[in-house]
Amino acid sequence: METNLNQVQARIESHIDELSTFTATPGKGTTRLTYSPEDLQARQYIKMKMEEYGLTVREDGFGNIFGKLEGSLKDAPSVLIGSHFDSVPNGGSYDGPAGVVAGLEVAALFAENKLTPKYPLEVIALVEEEGSRFGGGLMGSRGIVGLLDEEGFNRLKDKDGIYAVDAMKEIGLDPSLPKKRDPKTMKAYLELHIEQGPILEEKAIPIGVVEAIVGLTQLEVTVKGQAGHAGTTPMDRRADALVTAAKMIAEFPDLAESEGGGTVVTTGRLNVFPNGANVIPDRTVFTVDIRSGKEENVLNVIEKVKDLAVFYSKQGIEVSVEQLLYIQPKEMNKDIVSLLKRKSGELDIPKCSINSGAGHDAMVFSDFTNVGMLFIPSKDGLSHCPEEWSDSRHIANAVQVLFEAAKKLTEAE
């Protein structure tokens, strides 16, 4: 079985370079929000490459992209392989796209080696994993498995009040297409992702076989006070929503530390209204991202945030907490973990077991099908920033492992 590693690596670099040009912030990292003009550019490129590699392309009612290589078994479930193609604002070129590109390259190797799978192979490119535009995150995968229903999707809107369904139509997508997918149509899901941390680089190991993904929740806290003139309202007569928000946020590091067990708490988004330099803020809205390998730690911190909300709801201040997302810690499928380790060994590619501190579409699929995941090193452990970088040779190594695993899972001949 032929796999020209140099050729695969060159194609990977070409894919990554091309996708990185589809950004709203040239020279300042990748900003590719879901249903944006940059989303449309990336999706056109991905669909073009899927067709070039002999796949039948379709999109669903969320805008997820599927490229299918039919199998010889009639109506058999597919082996899915892919990741997401949206980004955080001013992010990097590898978080998500590396996994989509890996899926494309596995399909290319099937075509080059003239392989006919028994079970279909499907390369997938998922929307809104980051939650940067519509909040919550993992939207594409949650939609596929039915955790985000039609009604919930129709309610989604961005910070500018634009509804997701309208944003879809704006770039020519059809939200009336089928959304939920029958789990019986999915035999397995494989995902490659950059580590987004320093472990693999520090160990000088090119492949991490993911054993488990941390549990995570995202809360949205809204603090309501009273607007007023910055110069004429005495300090003791104020109901300043931003001051209260700041007091709450300042307590989160101590909450995480006292909880222990590797628990982390982050406020990554804070919006202040009316956002005038000489106006006392009457409303602030901020996110609270809570993660831990143990579910009890996540639940404890959620309760403590709610307790803080109650404590600070006084003297003209009203604090409310909404849970946008809750996902339990997830273990990867043991048989697929073993398969990925075995194929790495057969290819003489060093590997180690690793856990994921970030959430991924794989964690959503893990409740509905058999899931396996590979990590590759991230330079300096950096991610979600323009400096994010991973070696294309490491991606090519991972593609080899995924190709061999996909052959086995599809029983290709």
Image (spheres, rainbow, N blue to C red):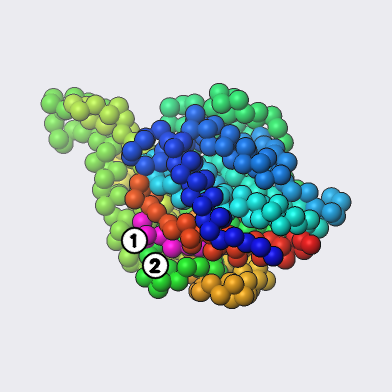
Residue indicated by mark 1: 380
Looking at the rendered structure, which numbered label has been put on residue 201? 2
Tell me how far mark 2 sits from mark 1, CA to CA: 7 Å
Residue 367 visible, this orientation: no
Secondary element under disc 1, as helix, strand or loop, is helix
- Across and down, in percent, residue 369 comes to 69, 58
Q: Is residue 114 above or below residue 348?
A: above
Sequence-first disc among 2 and 1: 2
- Across and down, in percent, residue 266 comes to 36, 53
Which residue occupies 30% across, 27% down? 274
Image quadrant holding the N terminus, namely: bottom right
Looking at the rendered structure, which numbered label has been put on residue 339? none
Marks 1 and 2: in contact by CB < 8 Å?
yes
Report the side of 229 relative to 200 (left or right).
left
Q: Nearer the viewer, residue 125 or 214?
A: 125
Stretch in magenta:
374-383
- Across and down, in percent, residue 29 comes to 37, 42
